[in-house]
């Protein structure tokens, strides 16, 4: 496994480094913060249930603080993604193992939440679909597979590639970031080890230094939690900036079941100050389009006029409403 990692690192550009620098990289890899032992959990196998979960709770409190320290970098990433998507680009997450699954989860939940096309927000996980529910041996060690997967996406300069690797050394992620740079795409790294190879391949680095895990090396724990928090921030902030949110309401949610239909009615009633019955009438007349329904309710116009106002405003809901 270690040999595979180093082959990947070299393939990702480390062979161009001086020998002294490469030796430093090896020492750093041997002493990754995410691989160190946590002194507080050395007797984990002798603890009671309440002691284990209390310890994990204490350790988890460090996660929000670590994320908080990276807010400037997270905000820069949001701005870069917004800029790229406004110019027709896509947001593409890349990860392996737990990090890849976090990426797949966030990418999958955004289309129904914000009404954005699945093509505009995607996730690549080392090993493909099989890796979402199970381990695919050796998948994360392949730089070439990352290049192949991104090549199939026909990467463009307006795209933003976000590589997620707790270790900062995952060859699949390094290969993806290196290929993205060659194609002129914006690169972002989310890692728990600031001084690793991933930081040199990304334009924006979000380093979530949460410290050693309760279970040594199990980065699905604090590192994974911190990744989930950052992905929440990235996708939600980007979608809000792109106008897929009205106030703090999901105005572009896809209504695929009764629960979501009821939520849409509550959203329209809340946002317009009208009765739920009026919201239901407007939503049906709008063809289940919530933003059209909101313009109808707030401006007292028919569906056709609401659609014209939204189109004239270039899809900007606030401008269509004159707000």
Image (cartoon, grey):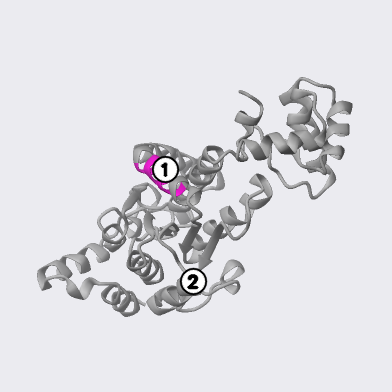
Secondary structure category for the residue under label 1: helix
Residue 205: percent from the left, percent from the top? 33, 51
- The number of numbered discs placed on residues in the rendered structure image is 2
* Residue 171 screen position, x and y as percent: 36, 71
- The residue carrying mark 1 is 79
Is residue 277 among what the camera can see? yes
Could you say which is closer to the camera, residue 280 or residue 129?
280
Would you place residue 83 above or below residue 247 in this image?
A: below
Query: Residues under labels 1 and 2: Cα distance?
Result: 27 Å
Instruction: Look at the numbered disc 2 and give the secondary structure of its residue.
Output: loop
Tell me, for residue 126, which label it has, or none.
2
Quarter of the view holding residue 3:
bottom left
Q: Give me the disc on residue 232.
A: none
Percent across and percent down for residue 103 are: 52, 57
Label 2 packing within 10 angstroms: few (<14), some (14-19), many (20+):
many
Left or right, residue 177 beside residue 309: left
Front-most of residues 104 and 160: 160
Residue at point 80% right, 24% down? Answer: 300
The first of marks 1 and 2 along the sequence is: 1
> Is residue 58 one of those drawn in magenta?
no
Residue at point 40% right, 47% down?
Answer: 80
Q: Quadrant of the N terminus?
A: bottom left
Q: Magenta stretch: give its range.
A: 73-81
Q: Is residue 248 visible?
A: no
**Above/below status of 128 relative to 65:** below
> In this image, 281 relative to 19: left or right?
right
- Dots 1, 2 in contact, CB < 8 A: no
Of 203 and 8, the residue lying toward us:
203
């Amino acid at each position: 496994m270690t040999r595979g990692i180093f082959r990947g690192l070299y393939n990702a550009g480390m062979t161009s480094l001086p020998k002294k620098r490469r030796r430093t990289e090896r020492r750093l890899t041997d002493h990754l913060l995410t691989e160190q032992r946590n002194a507080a959990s050395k007797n984990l196998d002798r603890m009671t249930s309440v002691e284990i979960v209390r310890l994990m709770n204490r350790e988890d409190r460090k996660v929000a603080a670590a994320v908080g320290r990276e807010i400037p970098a997270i905000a820069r990433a949001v701005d870069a993604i917004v800029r790229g998507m406004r110019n027709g680009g896509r947001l593409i997450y890349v990860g392996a193992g737990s990090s890849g699954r976090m990426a797949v989860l966030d990418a999958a939940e955004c289309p129904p939440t914000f009404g954005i096309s699945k093509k505009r927000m995607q996730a690549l996980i080392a090993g493909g679909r099989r890796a979402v529910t199970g381990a695919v041996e050796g998948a994360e060690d392949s730089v070439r597979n990352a290049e192949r997967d991104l090549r199939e996406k026909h990467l463009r300069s307006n795209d933003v590639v976000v590589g997620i690797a707790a270790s900062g050394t995952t060859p699949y992620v390094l290969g993806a970031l290196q290929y993205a740079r060659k194609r002129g795409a914006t690169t972002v790294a989310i890692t728990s080890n600031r001084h690793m190879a991933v930081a040199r391949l990304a334009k924006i680095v979000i380093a979530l230094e949460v410290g050693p895990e309760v279970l040594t090396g199990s980065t699905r724990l604090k590192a994974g939690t911190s990744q989930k928090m950052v992905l929440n921030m990235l996708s939600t902030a980007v979608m809000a900036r792109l106008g897929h949110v009205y106030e703090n309401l999901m105005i572009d949610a896809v209504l695929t079941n009764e629960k979501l239909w009821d939520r849409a009615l509550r959203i329209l009633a809340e946002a317009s100050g009208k009765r739920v019955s009026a919201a239901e009438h407007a939503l049906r007349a709008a063809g289940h389009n919530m933003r059209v329904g909101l313009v109808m309710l707030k401006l007292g116009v028919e569906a056709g006029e609401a659609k014209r106002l939204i189109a004239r405003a270039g899809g900007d809901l606030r401008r269509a409403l004159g707000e």
